[in-house]
Image (spheres, rainbow, N blue to C red):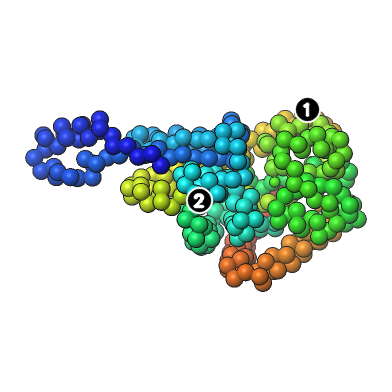
Amino acid sequence: MIKKVNTMSIRRTLLAAATVVVAAVGSPALAEETYTLRLAETWGPNSPILGETTKHFEDMLEMMSGGRIEVRIDSANKHKAPFGIFDMVRSGQYDMGHTASYYYKGSIPNAMYFTTVPFGMLAPEQYAWFYYGGGMELMQKVYEPYGLLSFPGGNTGNQMGGWFNEEINSLEDLDGLKMRTPGFAGEVMSELGVAVTNLPPGELYTALERGTIDALEWVGPALDFPMGFHQIADYYYSGWQEPGAEVQFLINQKTWEELPEELQEILRVAMRTAAYDMYAKSTNDNAQAWERMKEDYPNVEHKVFPPEVMDALRETTHRLLAEEAENDPLAREIITSQREYLKTVRKWTNISDKAYLDSVADQ
Ligand code: CA
């Protein structure tokens, strides 16, 4: 972090102090400093929704701190390490990162539960768990040994299950299917006979068009539409694998500790506001993109997986989670906390949002 003493501000403070007899010499205002936070994001430059979130964060932080904090954002084209954010913030090369914790499953396996879990919580349920159900404390327990702090960084909302060339009517249709789907969901699918690959976003369209893969999942209409998948696949399935994917802000702990308390609080507020706004923006942009897609491409058909497929996906998910819990006490603590919280919060969702949606006609 670049730290500078703001001489203009000191001069102003001294002038003001001279006119106030009781002003204490050496008050914190006299030592007012400005801070430059270098932030690396996984996303490319001008990335819709995700990149807008870091820009929103930057604007809020600079305004709310009265210019005492500046943010310098480097996108993936600059730092060339979209999946290296964890290491770069850990080493202090950057003060902050904006990324998704499940990308780092290889280096820090227990991080993946803080993005989303198949058949897990929806975004509002998960925010409730983070802020009021012990989620933040567990996340900190995972990141602390690495000298990092992690905060919710924005939600994509419920992600779609993906684009398919052929309808999925039974479990047999999954057998031998070549699909791009990363992370834990990929492990679940491969247990059901899917040939899983994880191609980078830039290769997805061509792979589907050429038949290298038969299906893929990316995010939802807002981010899928610009990729053009609707031009080459007809079936768009609702999801199961990422019911509320939360990206994250990572902060180097030394950077955090160097900031005065009031700036830490401003930072906390800016992150929380930027995160929640990304969720609102995702809802808006997904709705708009889906409307456009349906109008312009009537070939696109919305589908849900049949109960037989959903049951197998759910059972496999629970079996794999039980294995993870068996192998690692901290994983067990996180999985148990999420499962218990979901049990309670879902009862409320069911008699409020779900009952409401079930009882009103399509609007
Ligand atoms: Ca996804």
Residue furthest out toward the top? 296
Give residue 309's quadrant in the image: bottom right
The disc label shown at residue 90, or none = 2
Pointer 2 or 1: first along the chain: 2
Kindly identify the residue that appears in the image at 59 percent across and 51 percent down.
Answer: 101
Question: Is the residue under label 1 in contact with that under label 2 (CB below 8 Å)?
Answer: no
Amino acid residing under circle 2? Arg
Residue 184: tell me if it is visible. yes
Rendered location of residue 236, percent (x, y): 79, 42
Packing grade of label 2 (10 A; few <14, some 14-19, many >=20) is many
Residue closest to the eye, 224 or 330:
330
Amino acid residing under circle 1? Asp
Kindly identify the residue that appears in the image at 87 percent across and 53 percent down.
Answer: 174
Residue closest to the eye, 184 or 354:
184
Disc 2 Cβ-to-ligand 1 distance below 8 Å:
no
The disc label shown at residue 296, or none = 1
